[in-house]
Image: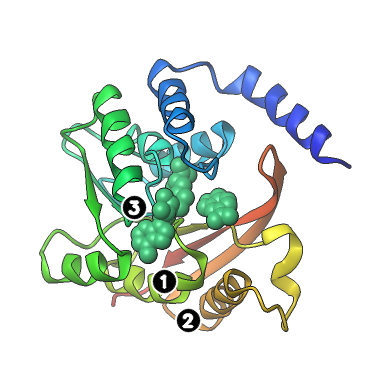
Amino acid sequence: MTQEKWTAVDRYITDILVPPDPALDAALQASDAAGLPPHNVSPNQGKLLMLLALIHKAHNILEIGTLGGYSTIWLARALPTNGRLITLESDPKHAEVARHNITHAGLTNIVEVRVGKALDTLAKLATENCHPFDLIFIDADKPSNPEYFSWALKLSCKGSLIIADNVVRDGAVIEPDSVDPKVQGIRRFNEMLGSEPRVSATAIQTVGSKGYDGFAIALVTSDQ
Ligand code: SAH
Ligand code: DHB
Ligand code: MG
């Protein structure tokens, strides 16, 4: 199996199941035009996030890692009009592109983009009374995933869903001696999911237009 085939099958799936959407398509175009890295979730992954948020009847979502707001828009689409999504981004240029895309998607009343290193903005968030979040999507710098998981737990309650992108990294995740700090961050994160008694978690390998990677999903099963 090749990347070419994975991309072709993703296109096939997307053609059938993910109809063109002006705001989402424009968000990808604007992100690309602004020179943002193509690290957004793929369209069929974005729709999976939206469906998970809908199944979960999420009202209050936290996203760590905004980029151009593509996954943000998918997740926010699952929210009721009184729902709320806070998304954290360290790069002011990414945040600016995201705000533009979110405005174009008509989601300014629901989505708030907070600029700063997520470890700082998470600490601030914990002092406010807007938490707990019922869905948290972790998709920023991978070396910090262990800390992001700890914060996600603090900002959760029983029943919250924690989802993380990029937990397989081309299979590099099984290399204990990897010198890649991203791989080590993901490994530590996966181990935390396994040893944390307050969550029930699994991870799924994925192939597609973004290569070979995976998602982890954890349900918070007890009160904090
Ligand atoms: N969730 C997005 C993709 C995010 S890419 C989508 O699927 O559409 C990862 C993002 O995390 C990048 O925009 C990067 O600038 C941001 N990031 C990296 N380090 C960060 C940090 N310490 N705090 C917050 N955001 C960070
Ligand atoms: C990278 C980050 C992502 O969130 C992603 O989905 C793909 C790649 C990266 O930093 O390389
Ligand atoms: Mg990602």
Near mark 2 (Cα within 10 A), the count class, few <14, some 14-19 or many ≥20, is: few
Q: Which one is earlier in the sequence, the residue at label 2 or at label 1? A: 1
Residue flagged by tag 2: what amino acid is it? Glu
Near mark 1 (Cα within 10 A), the count class, few <14, some 14-19 or many ≥20, is: many
* Tag 3–tag 2 contact (CB < 8 Å): no
Mark 3: is the Cβ under 8 angstroms from ligand 1? yes
Q: Nearer the viewer, residue 38 or 107?
A: 38
* Quadrant position of the C terminus in the picture: bottom left
For residue 158, side relative to residue 84 (left or right): right
Q: Residue at x 10, y 64 (%)?
A: 129
Residue position marked by numbered label 1 in the rendering:
149
Q: Of the numbered discs in the image, which one, if any, rests on residue 91?
A: 3
Q: Nearer the viewer, residue 50 or 172?
A: 172
Near mark 3 (Cα within 10 A), the count class, few <14, some 14-19 or many ≥20, is: some
For discs 3 and 2, the disc positioned in front in the rendered view: 3
Secondary structure state at the residue bearing disc 2: loop
Residue 114 coordinates in the image, percent (x, y): 22, 52
- In the rendered image, the vertical position of residue 140 relative to residue 183, given as above or below: above
Residue flagged by tag 1: what amino acid is it? Phe
